[in-house]
Image: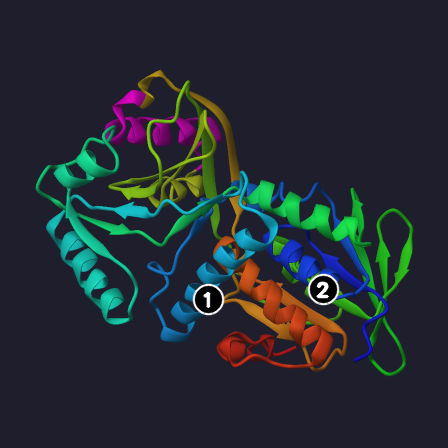
Amino acid sequence: MKLPERVAVIGVGILGASVGWNLSRRGAKVVFIDAGRPGEGVTNWSFSWVNASNKTVSKSYFDLNVAGMAAHRELAGTIGADSWWHPSGHLRWVDDPVAEAKLLKLAELLACWDYRVEVCTGAKVRRRLEPALTMPGEGPVVFYPDEAWVHGRHLVGRLVGQAVASGAQLRTGTVVRDIGTGSDGNVRTVALSDGSRLDVDIVVNAAGPGASHVAGLIARNLPMRREPGVITRIDCAQVPVHRAMHAPHIEIRPDGDASMVLHSREVDALIDTGEEPAQLARLLHESAQHVVPELGNSRIAQTRVAFRPIPADGFPSVGAVPSVPGYYEAVSHSGITLGPVIGRLLATEILSGERDEMLADFRPERFPV
């Protein structure tokens, strides 16, 4: 098998880092390209919840996310878990009868799909798992023991660091201005905003929210949703909870020993009304205190509105674009869950031409060039 002379990975979030790491460890020459530092874009500003319980819209998408969860566990064994991998499970509960019926129906479906799920009471959760929570004692709480959260920036740093140590290059502070093709239509060059030009055989578009722009450089249409989300980090003397959770109106997870991450779809809906990020952060903080009263002594540290990288139909776009030989896409929301499995599958496709059936429903060809 002849390896590509050089692969340019555009975007160094979780997807780009995963693809580049897998390519590098198999002998390919990789150059990472990003305007910012590795993992400090959307990867650092997501809820970073590794799961398949929220991915039941189709069985193939669910199966891909289950494979993503398994790939994380394998990756932790390969590179070491350290500060990035937190397989402590996930809790979800609601506060109205209609939502409760839907939650319990989902739990039944997941159990039928051999996904581990436990239905507990609030009293049992407080006694066994999370004593700091305020929740109805007899209401149902669903616990997914195999789910996890990830410190995305730390994981990206680890993957890129290992790739660079084995010969990959890292070009930060610059963006791709042009992708050149030869007379045969194959990708040949990448021009950067710093004035340099790279000779390449392969380009991987892992540019997250900027993926549509990068695709446009080869005259490809990659329609993306406009879906902003706000994430707030709060500092506290000691984190009072141990796992990710979806409580009524608020999502909460640890982010280390003295920091937590807050998110809410309800608060996301206020972004386009003109509310300032500082006010959105206050709303998140107030909601979190209803669930974890100890957070009354915490303080808001950072808030960011980021755009999720979601192709128009809501599913990943992963693989080759046949009309432009040498051009590949790795674009998806749920990048945290899917990063390790997409990285492995796409690297195999690039190096061997082998197209994994698991990606059949998520090929770029479904969007016409």
Residue that lies at the very extreme toward the left in this rendered image: 138
Indicate how the structure is coloured in the image. rainbow
At horizontal 73% and vertical 59% (from top left) the residue drawn is: 9
Does residue 270 sit above or below 55 in this rendering?
A: above
Task: Tell me the residue that label 2 is attached to.
Answer: 23
Magenta stretch in the rendered image: 274-294
Q: Is residue 356 left or right of residue 210?
A: left
Identity, as a three-letter code, of the amino acid under mark 2: Leu
Magenta stretch prevailing secondary structure: helix
* Percent of width and height locating residue 328: 68, 70
Task: Tell me the residue that label 1 is attached to.
Answer: 67
At horizontal 53% and vertical 64% (from top left) the residue drawn is: 311
Q: Is residue 145 left or right of residue 79?
A: left
Q: How many neighbours does mark 2 have within 10 angstroms: few (below 14), some (14-19), or many (20 or more)?
A: many
* Percent of width and height locating residue 82: 55, 40
Q: CA distance from mark 2 to mark 1?
A: 19 Å
* Percent of width and height locating residue 296: 31, 19
* Percent of width and height locating residue 69: 45, 59
| Nearest to N terminus: mark 2 or mark 1 | 2
Q: Is residue 104 left or right of residue 153?
A: left
Residue nearest the observer in this picture, 211 or 29: 29
> On the rendered image, what quadrant is the N terminus found in?
bottom right
SS at mark 1 in the image:
helix
Residue nearest the observer in this picture, 66 or 162: 162
Q: Is residue 112 left or right of residue 19?
A: left
User: Can residue 333 be spotted in the picture?
Assistant: no
Identity, as a three-letter code, of the amino acid under mark 1: Ala
